[in-house]
Amino acid sequence: MMTGFSLLIDGKAHAGSGSFDVVNPATGQAFAHCPRADETLLNDAVAAAKAAFPGWARTPASERARLVHALADALESRSEEFARLLTSEQGKPLGQAQYELMASVGTLRTFAEMKIEPRTLRDDERGLVIEHRTPLGVVAAITPWNFPVILLMNKVGPALVAGNTMVAKPAPTTPLTTLLFGELCREILPAGVVNIICDENDLGSLLTGHPDVAKVAFTGSTATGSKVMQSAAKGIKRVTLELGGNDAAIVLDDADVKDVAGKVFHGAMLNAGQICVAVKRAYVPSAMYDPFCDELARLAKDMVVDEGTRQGAEIGPVQNRAQYEKVKAFLADANENGNVIAGGMALDRPGYFIAPTIVRDLPRDARIVQEEQFGPVLPVLAYDDIDMLIDEVNASDYGLAGTVWGQDRKRALEVAMQIDSGTVWVNQHMAIDPSIPFRGSKQSGLGGELGQAGLHEYTQAHIVNAAA
Ligand code: NAD
């Protein structure tokens, strides 16, 4: 059993008020003890962040940026240790864990290079108007279990650069990489600037409702996002919600079947399908439906499913037992209502492994078409009329992202413009870049992360308006 992890409160390692086990999803066995907080420690963490705020907000922006760069450098120098721990707690293949670490380093560096400059909105005979941006105070950062490192860095980078302090709370099934990051914060940052607590899914509402928290930066499910919004309402707290999705891949009739099937498949299966912007339903013209489905099935059967630490593993387990049971329920529905042409079952081995699955010939209202599966199971549907299809795709309550695939770029762009979602990628997928804003429409989110706009979400616009 791995031990020795600590919470981070006011610059000090804290053993917590108790502990719980963390399970390796590739074995189904506990492999580490994680310290947990209670309400008293949560209050201590918020109090430490509150006390550290005035000093951090007054620290010159160049010095804050230097320290965020130092965090990036430290994360990079220990990235192999982080990646191994990430694979153990999350399940993803080691190469993908290493990629998450390097992308996290890049995110911190991108934010450390961003500036928040005052803007002169008017300077004429009517007067002088300047818009400043000031930090908000204590940010509560709450993250899910699919990308525990990078989704935290998406919050740490802008929050710190803008002059806020933070209490971070990871998901209970993937807390360890966040605690390890706490060690870097302890060495590099002034006490109280970043605090880290862990829970067993029981402290979230106390944190988001805490009167001394000014903003909640949340990534997780739409159901929990709604609760976050409710509890933040009382103090009119700022919220950023990055929530669920049911992203469609729309394949146009001039697409290259083999090439696009490969890319759509990759977009559906990466991280065992547990990506907010994974391809969660694919729509293919009727004339191309059979060859496209066949190619997807071939790819699914070829995929190497194994423990993330094994050489050659392309897809690991689903991250936790609850999600594993949820994906199995989707499989049962798919087996009953559609034609499963690859996979279709859980693997007969320890851990939470699901065979990469392709389902065709499903009714439009099948559960797996309408809901977010968050697992390695892709439904493929045929269509004949692109305008009707756009309406069908847009009928979802979600609007996170989506993709359009076709050789005529102008036509593909015209279709992309009509999709009601925060992002649409054309002839590529998951081109997420920390300098490009990312946000969801409808029930996929509120506000956004990344880009200069994402940095501004950690600030209050402040107008100073002087007479001429
Ligand atoms: P979840 O909503 O169950 O949990 C997310 C976090 O919220 C965890 O840390 C959890 O402990 C905490 N939490 C639980 N109850 C809470 C409460 N009442 N108040 C505050 N916090 C609470 O989500 P999950 O199952 O961990 O993650 C999967 C979901 O996240 C999927 O729907 C996925 O699409 C979404 N997601 C979205 C994005 C995005 O950027 N839009 C990125 C990754 C994941």
Image (tube, rainbow, N blue to C red):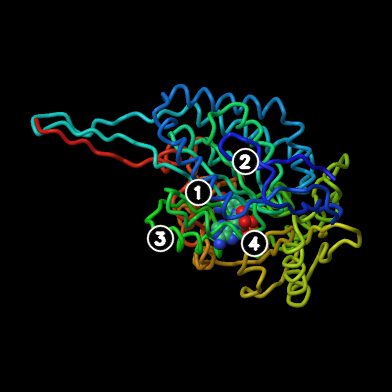
On the image, the x and y values in percent for residue 36 come to 67, 51
Q: Secondary structure at mark 2?
A: helix
Mark 1 residue CB less than 8 A from any atom of ligand 1: no
Residue type of the residue flagged with mark 1 = Ala
To which residue does mark 2 refer? 150
Vertical side of 40 occupied by 187: above or below: above
Looking at the rendered structure, the secondary structure element under dot 4 is strand
**Amino acid type assigned to the residue bearing label 3 in the image:** Ala
Is residue 247 visible in this depiction of the protein?
no
| Front position among marks 4 and 1 | 1
- Circles 3 and 1: CB atoms closer than 8 Å: no
Q: Earlier in the sequence, mark 3 or mark 2?
A: 2
Mark nearer the N terminus (3 vs 1): 1
- Residue 415 horizontal side relative to residue 263, left or right: left
Query: Of tags 2 and 1, which is closer to the observer?
Result: 1
Quarter of the picture containing the C terminus is top left
Q: Is residue 450 above or below residue 359?
A: above
Disc 1: which residue: 217
Residue where numbered disc 3 is placed: 233
Mark whose residue sits in front, 4 or 3: 3
Spot occupied by residue 84 in the image (x, y as percentages of width and height): 79, 38
Which of the 4 image quarters holds residue 14?
Answer: top right
For mark 3, give the secondary structure. helix
| Amino acid tagged 4 | Arg
- In primary-sequence order, the first of circles 4 and 1 is 1
Give the residue pinned by disc 4.
Answer: 281
Mark 1 neighbour density, 10 Å: few (under 14) some (14–19) many (20 or more): many
Q: Earlier in the sequence, mark 4 or mark 3?
A: 3
* Helix, strand or loop at mark 1: strand
Q: CA distance from mark 2 to mark 4?
A: 25 Å
